[in-house]
Image (cartoon, rainbow, N blue to C red):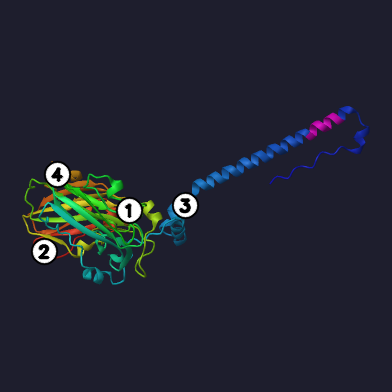
Amino acid sequence: MASYPAPPRRPTASRTAGSGAAVVATLLGILVAVLAVAAVVLMQAADEARDEAKAAGTPKAATSMAGHDHSAASNTATALPLESFAGKTAANAAELAAAHVPYDATLPAVPSGDLIKVHMTLKDITVEIAPGVRYNTWAFGGHGAPGPVVHVRQGQTVEMTLTNGGAIPHSIDFHAARIAPDVAFRDVAPGESFTFRFKAGDPGVYMYHCGTKPVLAHIANGMYGAIVVSPAAALPKADREYVLIASEWYLNGDGVSRPASLDMAKARAAMPDWTTFNGYANQYVTHPLTAKPGETVRFYVVAAGPTLDTNFHVVGTIFDRAWLNGDMTRFQQGVQTVAVPAGGGAVFDVKIDEPGLYPFVSHAFAHVDLGQVGLLKVGEVTGTMSH
Ligand SMILES: [Cu+2]
């Protein structure tokens, strides 16, 4: 800092001098004071300029060092508010992945009769979502996420009973229903059951989920599934029909040393640790879905979210038919990739003649990296895929 100059002192002799000398002395004093103030202002300006230069230079320096200097890298990580557990599996991941029993993706048959009774019991259970990665779910149907696939035909009536075997209130919201949600989708208290009916009048593939607040947490904890309403008029013949429910998981720990639970901050930030088809990362890479050459394979795809869409694509082929947004009244042909929005569904046909391993993915490749990828094995082939 600048030191302020001492106030001008009049020489004792000047007291007896003329008033002219006094005026000169006063003016000189004022001049010195003005100069001092100007010096302070200039120094402050210089300080600010230096700070701005420093601020502008910092990120550049950090970026250039990040790849080479561990302290710079850890500084960057420390600056992030949320910790990722992406890709962290148990040491014997390959063995566990092989032992994992995959979610059965096969579309179940439509039950006969006009009234289809569906009973799901909600349970709080710990499941594996990736090799050695355990997660504390709230699960429909008592067997983890997703809940069971419901398959009905257009015109049938669904009678849904939800039994709450969990610790807090839950509910079930069917996107396939036209019904007053404040009545049908109401909260069910722990230990209680609730039944409602709706007519499945609109064909398509729909999401169902818990609608209890905060919905983000209830879906993120595994409370979702798919209902397929097949059109009354038959669709073109398909030889195999598979249901894929895309979703993401947000973990508050790696889930390996002890089961993880929901990290709500990461869910709000849409920063998943794992993204999956049918609840378990890469399960159909280890245990591929199958078809014979020349068969038509139909995929019913739902993006459960809770937040992210899935961009469905099958590597090595093109969709022969794509019923976008689950609109079963018309399809598009020759489509490569279709965005299925969170809370939406779509149906896809592929007919593959050449034997091989055909990956199905969300073509937003961050999702593939986090586990939303599987294989369709056409014919008797061996080996692996790079995707
Ligand atoms: Cu719930």
Secondary element under disc 4, as helix, strand or loop, is loop
The range drawn in magenta is: 22-29
Which amino acid type is shown beneath numbered disc 4? Met
Query: If you read the primary sequence from the N terminus, does the residue marked by circle 4 or circle 1 appear first?
Result: 1
Q: Position of residue 27 (x, y in %)?
A: 80, 31
Above or below, 129 against 366 in this view is: below
Distance from disc 4 to disc 1, alpha carbons, whole Å, reads 31 Å
Nearer to the camera, 47 or 21: 47
Secondary element under disc 1, as helix, strand or loop, is loop
Q: Is residue 284 visible?
A: yes
Which amino acid type is shown beneath numbered disc 3? Ala
Quadrant field for ligand 1:
bottom left
Q: Which residue is mark 2?
A: 381
Query: If you read the primary sequence from the N terminus, does the residue marked by circle 4 or circle 3 appear first?
Result: 3
Q: Which residue is mark 3?
A: 61
Q: Which residue is mark 1?
A: 187
Q: Determine the main secondary structure of the stretch shown in magenta.
A: helix
Above or below, 381 against 51 in this view is: below
Quadrant of the rendered image containing residue 328: top left
Distance from disc 2 to disc 1, alpha carbons, whole Å, reads 49 Å
The circle drawn on residue 328 is 4
Task: Find out whether the residues at labels 2 and 3 contact each other: C-beta distance under 8 Å.
Answer: no
Q: Is residue 64 left or right of residue 360?
A: right
